């Protein structure tokens, strides 16, 4: 089971304020525990939304909207992608995290079993294999 643990943005992260040395040490200690447990697939901090953009679908096609974005409560400042055995296991990791997090399970191909055509399921399986072959996470 794969879960995404997200750290929400705040005024400091959106302003580009770097965390304290103590906060970085706590995060590094936590990251080290995740790596040693073999559950960390990826984890990164994100630049402020002022450096990003969103796409919107309009009647005329897609439109690009540059950041910053006003509602910091809706923004993500960083994340961890974990591979664990159960929801209970990711819950324990979330409790140990030095930052408050939102945790969501990733959807896998089995989730779409009722609606996906067999040929599309096979395409998804092959794409996942290719991503892993290239060194990515699928």
Image (cartoon, helix red, strand yellow):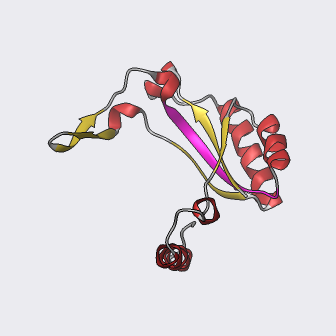
57 falls in the magenta region:
no
Pick the front one: 111 or 103: 111
What's the residue at 45%, 26% (across, down)? 14
Pick the front one: 4 or 87: 87
Residue 129 rendering spot, x and y as whole percentages:
55, 78
What's the residue at 48%, 31% (across, down)? 75
Residue 125 position by quadrant = bottom right
On-image quarter of the C terminus: bottom right
Name the main secondary structure of what is drawn in magenta: strand
What's the residue at 61%, 34% (across, down)? 7
Q: Is residue 53 above or below residue 124?
A: above
In the displayed structure image, the side of residue 85 where residue 12 appears, left or right: left
Q: Is residue 32 above or below residue 93?
A: below
* Outermost front residue: 114
In the displayed structure image, the side of residue 74 where residue 51 appears, left or right: left
Q: Is residue 48 above or below residue 70?
A: below
In the displayed structure image, the side of residue 79 where residue 62 appears, left or right: left
What's the residue at 57%, 66% (across, down)? 137
Q: Is residue 38 above or below residue 98?
A: below
What stretch of residues is rendered in magenta? 75-85
Residue 79 rendering spot, x and y as whole percentages:
59, 44
Residue 6 position by quadrant = top right
Pick the front one: 40 or 122: 122
Residue 87 rendering spot, x and y as whole percentages:
80, 47
């Amino acid at each position: 089971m794969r879960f995404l643990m997200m750290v929400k943005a705040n005024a400091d992260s959106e302003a580009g304020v770097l965390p304290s040395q103590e906060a970085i040490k706590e995060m590094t200690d936590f990251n080290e525990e995740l790596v040693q447990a073999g559950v960390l697939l990826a984890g990164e901090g994100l630049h402020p939304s002022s450096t990003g953009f969103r796409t919107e679908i309009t009647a005329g096609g897609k439109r690009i909207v540059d950041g910053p974005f006003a509602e910091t409560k809706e923004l993500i400042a960083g994340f961890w992608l974990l591979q664990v055995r159960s929801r209970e296991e990711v819950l324990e990791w979330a409790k140990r995290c030095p930052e408050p997090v939102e945790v969501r399970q990733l959807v896998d191909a089995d989730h779409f079993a009722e609606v996906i055509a067999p040929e599309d399921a096979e395409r998804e399986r092959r794409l996942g294999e290719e991503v892993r072959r290239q060194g990515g996470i699928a």
